[in-house]
Amino acid sequence: MLPFARRCIVAAAATLPLLVLAAAPVETVQPPQSPTPLTLLSKEGRRALPVYLVSEQEFVALDDLAGVFQLSVHDALGAITVSYKGKTIVLTPDQALASVSGKLISLPAAPSRLTAAGAPSRWLVPVEFISRALAPIYDTRVDFRKPSHLLVLGELRVPHVAIRYEPQSAGGRLTFDATPRTLSTVTQENDRLVVRFDADALDAPLPPLQNAQPQGLVQGLRTLDQVTLAVDLGPRFSSFRASTQALDAASRLTIDIVAAQTEAPTAPGPAGPAQPTAPPPELPGTAPTSPIRTVAIDAGHGGDDAGVVGGNGTKEKDLTLAVARRLKTAMESRLGVRVLLTRDEDRNVPIDERTATANHNKADLFVSLHANGSLRPRTAGTQILYASFEKGAEEAARASLGTERVPTFGGGTRDIELVIWDLAQTRHVDRSATFAQILERQIRGRMPLAARPVDHAPLLVLESANMPAVLIEMGYLTNPDQERQLTGSEMQNAIVQAIVEAVLRFRETLGGLT
């Protein structure tokens, strides 16, 4: 089931009334040691929200959220009701589910009661409640970034900056990838380089410089203020060169740091720096003009986000990864295309990073794999979704189009096309719908389909994809029969074959070869 903030829940759950169930016994939780708090960024400033650990799961107090978001919280008749401007979320103490304005969504854990001596009890909810339940009813943008413990409220510019360092024969290279694209400047101030970003704040985890050269070239990386980073230089520093490159949806700042030469440089040996991975060569039989040469496969959920969990313990995150790996092997061997996995292990991957992987690698197709869930155990079937946008979004995207001439590394310039990051998919919706319909025809007969097998919804994981993109709900893990089928090789192979055949047919519509 989708974990994303503006998810449109489909199938039977969409018609459910508000849930008011009989109270069930709830384990009382004693105050645990608080981990790293959430940092809330808004136009009013920065503040911290306490986070609590319950059975190794991160929770936040409902009354803390109520104070920030002006929520009304009521606990009565065995249900917890959270209201905002006429919109309602209903939670039940013994279920990891919530009804959000009548739409059912999953949570990684049920609400927990926090008690402390001499203080009234408080209800805690998993931190994912913010993005999955609260964001859809709130009238201001809510951007929750769990890996960074960051909560951005409103239209603030808070780019995610991925930083890496690579030692080289005559110095080192620092790379700052800012998503979405963000202007930056580099200046030298005594024994440090100062990197400033044109933003309101940064989401920039600082990596340990494990690869930094021990000869005193780069000694550290630290934060100076909300939008400024400092690179501390060592005694062997001589000079630097900075260049900026515009990627599809991000900007890359490259700083080449030149060392003072005390001896002739030597080429790095077998343990030297890894060079950027080049795309694999075209396989025999594939035409270089094929319109689909790179496919990005997104295995939904991961890490502490298990997604839907079936009655026999099947986790959505494990199912999606297993199918993604099968699909990668099948596509590479049969279609001769390059296949990227947004994750190839059990780890958290932020939503923006999933589409950024596809965009940065110029993927021609994006497929996100998921499994569904419902309170009705008989609900079953595969469904294919493509993105939809609010009225006027397509016009806004079209109005944002333009070109900008930017410098490239090594000299020269290039023209790049501009489009709003969150609206990149608007240019591809028609082709995404075409692929969804082709996929539905290939799935039909191989596995059961949902009552509405093809639909569109405002899906965060698709809206930034700058290529045709679909999301596949492979089936319902809450249906015992379908859970058993989805864990077996037969149905997983059927899903893979249907997708491969659909890509072949879709490639034909784009003018490619079979």
Image (cartoon, grey):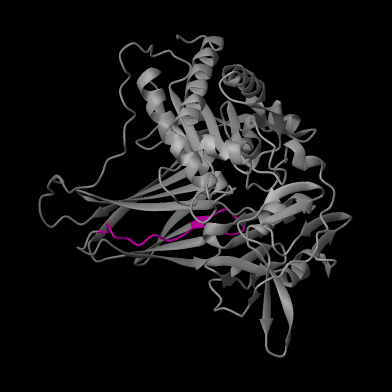
Question: Quick check: 245 left or right of 443?
Answer: left
Say which quarter of the image contains residue 460.
top right
Question: In the picture shown, does residue 452 fall above or below 92?
Answer: above
Say which quarter of the image contains residue 186.
bottom left
Q: Quadrant of the N terminus?
A: top right
Q: Main secondary structure of the magenta part?
A: loop
Q: Where in the figure is residue 10, as x and y percent of width and height?
A: 73, 37
Q: Where in the figure is residue 32, as x and y percent of width and height?
A: 57, 78
Q: Is residue 295 visible?
A: yes
Residue 72: in magenta span: no
Q: Quadrant of the C terminus?
A: top left
Residue 206: in magenta span: yes
Q: Is residue 247 visible?
A: no
Stretch of the chain drawn in magenta = 196-212
> Relative to the observer, which residue lies in front, 120 or 40?
120
> Relative to the observer, which residue lies in front, 206 or 263?
206
> Relative to the observer, which residue lies in front, 417 or 129?
129
Residue appearing at x 37%, y 28% in the figure: 329
Say which quarter of the image contains residue 120.
bottom right
Q: Where in the figure is residue 321, as x and y percent of width and height?
A: 46, 40
Residue appearing at x 72%, y 90% in the figure: 118
Residue appearing at x 51%, y 46% in the figure: 317
Q: Residue furthest bottom?
A: 118
The total number of labels drawn is 0
Q: Where in the figure is residue 44, as x and y percent of width and height?
A: 72, 66
Residue appearing at x 13%, y 49% in the figure: 265
